[in-house]
Amino acid sequence: MDIDLDNGLIVQKNEQDTLIGQLHFTFLPGKKVLSIDQVFVDPQFRNQGWARKILQASIDLAQEKNYKIMPVCPYAKAVFKHEKALQILLATPEVDHNEAK
């Protein structure tokens, strides 16, 4: 798995250099928060656990830097909602702005 801190990208490829999936993240300026913006897995590699593995790389990165996490993409939000042990890493309580309207 390749992590590009400058461009906020985690990329997973297979042995043939085919893209399996990627995660876009942002370090929020002035805060010790990593925002998980998007997780993508190529359709041919879905339902094999790749999204969770790529997400875990971002969680590990945040923990190494002692950052909190703000899941923005729907997949990351769902994982943090269902895996209670991860909730200690959240930057702020999750708020669904669509429900507040």
Image (cartoon, rainbow, N blue to C red):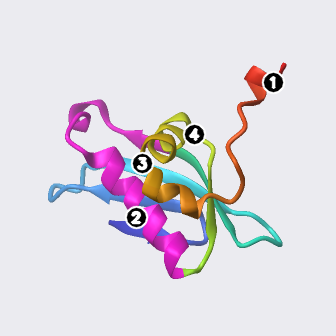
Q: Position of residue 37 (x, y in %)?
A: 60, 47
Mark closer to the chain start, 4 or 2: 2
Label 4–label 3 contact, CB within 8 A: no
Mark closer to the chain start, 4 or 3: 4
The residue that mark 1 highlights is: 100
In this view, 5 is above or below 26? below
34 relative position to 19: left or right: right
Q: How many marks?
A: 4
Mark closer to the chain start, 3 or 1: 3
Q: Secondary structure at mark 2?
A: helix
**Nearest-to-viewer mark from 4 and 3:** 3
In front of the other: 7 or 90:
90
The N terminus, quarter of image? bottom left
12 relative position to 33: left or right: left
Q: Is residue 43 magenta?
A: yes
| Amino acid type, label 3 | Glu
Q: Position of residue 50 (x, y in %)?
A: 28, 47
Mark closer to the chain start, 2 or 1: 2
Mark closer to the chain start, 3 or 2: 2
The residue that mark 2 highlights is: 57
Q: Secondary structure at mark 4?
A: loop
Q: Which residues are magenta?
A: 39-64
Label 4–label 2 contact, CB within 8 A: no
In front of the other: 71 or 88:
88
The residue that mark 4 highlights is: 73
The rendered magenta stretch, by its main secondary structure, is classed as: helix
Query: Residue 61 has which mark?
Result: none
